[in-house]
Amino acid sequence: MASSVALIVLLGLICYKIFTWIRLPGFLGILLLGMAIGPNGFDWIDESILLVSGDLRKIALIIILLRAGLGLHRQTLKKVGLPALRLGFIPVITEGFVILLAAVLLLDFTAVEAGMLGFIIAAVSPAVIVPKMLHFIHTGKGADKGIPTMILAGASIDDVVAITIFSAFAGFYTGSSLSVTGHIVSIPVAIVTGALLGMGIALALLYLFKRFKVRHTKKILIIVAASILLTATEDLLQNYIPIAALLGVMVIGFIIFERKPELGLTLSGKFAKIWVFAEILLFFLVGAEVDFLLAIDAGLVGLAIIGIGLLGRSLGVLISLLQTNLTLREKGFCMMAYSPKATVQAAIGSVPLALGVPNGDIILTVAVLSIVITAPVGSIAMNIMGNTFLKGKSLE
């Protein structure tokens, strides 16, 4: 296992450097590396790493969400509050149901199968979006209108909505007794409980850091450990109360920065250094989950469904941004920034197949194709459009 980790890190750094040198997103090189030497490629990686892949990806995602929380400012959130809330709900619901209709018509799916497909595909990828938005916040791009912060906040809710509605359709298939109304009500409940738990953990940690002398390095470890336990709590209580744990993780960072700005800046810098390793691990393992041959098998119909879904999402983004002062170019950036898929699709794309859904293999195939297409294209588009369409000067 140790030699596999060394291989991932060394080759990951090389691929990252090559792709940034040719002006492509560095993470794309790592993603392709995972596809090439993972179990669906040359299979050079120890199986023991892949057995804990889900946990390792979760830890990496926690690190980037903590960084995101430490990069949010109260005044900016106030400025973008309502549009961010709309971005959290409208695009994902629009895309999910557009794909549902397309799958029924083009793939002859049942409504339940199409619903599962729709809300697997509809979730955006925080792993792709968050680093980009943090970069734009750092360089001041779009800061005058709070555009990166708005997208960060909206994306954190987007995944909660997608996974909850997917769970509802999966429940319909398995005969779960929870009603449609119950699933709908669980969305705001999950958001509120996640935010409150994140706030409580942050305040407890700040008290701990004030009461006892703790070095910054140890603070990082304690914060990451507390965040992991928060996500474990979500799994433990999922049958009793819904919790948006990943949103709670972001709230931990936000509260720490809000209460102790100097500490927040210090911790943010340290998390940025940890992210160098976490990014390699996250995108390599996401790539390792991708079966490129499956993606090819999806064919033109799979591409059509993904494209139709993205049109629905873009319409949802435009609706969400009504009555804002964003220019047409800035709205175009928001549409592209809200398109990448990766982590959620890799995590739950195989669930319908495991449940015995008749078209589960097709659902997995289209989920894989959505990663292969939208993650690199969306990231490249964010780079180009963000640097061209967003106002602001580098702070470096």
Image (cartoon, rainbow, N blue to C red):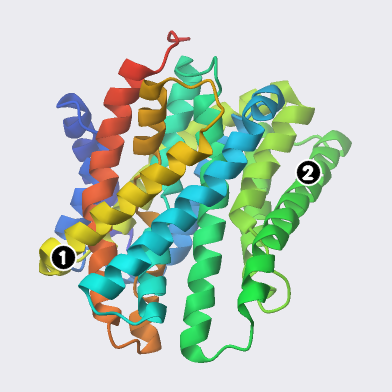
Circle 2 crowding by C-alpha within 10 Å: few under 14, some 14–19, many from 20: some
Answer left or right for 27 relative to 132.
Answer: left
Relative vertical location of residue 139 with respect to residue 80 in this rendering, above or below: above
Relative vertical location of residue 38 with respect to residue 219 in this rendering, above or below: below
Q: Which label was assigned to residue 231?
A: none
Relative vertical location of residue 359 with respect to residue 140 in this rendering, above or below: below
Kindly state the secondary structure of the residue where label 2 is placed: helix
Seen from the viewer's position, the closer of residues 238 and 88 is 88
Circle 1 crowding by C-alpha within 10 Å: few under 14, some 14–19, many from 20: some
- Report x, y in % for residue 278: 42, 45
The answer to whether residue 139 of the structure is visible from this angle is yes
- Report x, y in % for residue 213: 80, 34
Answer left or right for 220 relative to 154.
Answer: right
Q: Quadrant of the N terminus?
A: bottom left
Give the residue at x 66% y 74%: 181
Seen from the viewer's position, the closer of residues 171 and 5 is 171
Q: Tag 1 or tag 2, which sits nearer the N-term?
A: 2
Answer left or right for 79 relative to 280.
Answer: right
Seen from the viewer's position, the closer of residues 172 and 24 is 172
Separation of marks 2 and 1 at Cα, in angstroms: 50 Å
- Report x, y in % for residue 5: 31, 54
Q: Which residue is identified by label 1?
A: 301
Give the residue at x 67% y 75%: 182
Kindly state the secondary structure of the residue where label 1 is placed: helix
Q: Which label was assigned to residue 205?
A: 2
- Report x, y in % for residue 269: 55, 27
Q: Quadrant of the C terminus?
A: top left
Which amino acid type is shown beneath numbered disc 2? Leu
The answer to whether residue 271 of the structure is visible from this angle is no
Answer left or right for 382 relative to 196.
Answer: left
Q: Quadrant of residue 288?
A: bottom left
Which amino acid type is shown beneath numbered disc 1? Val
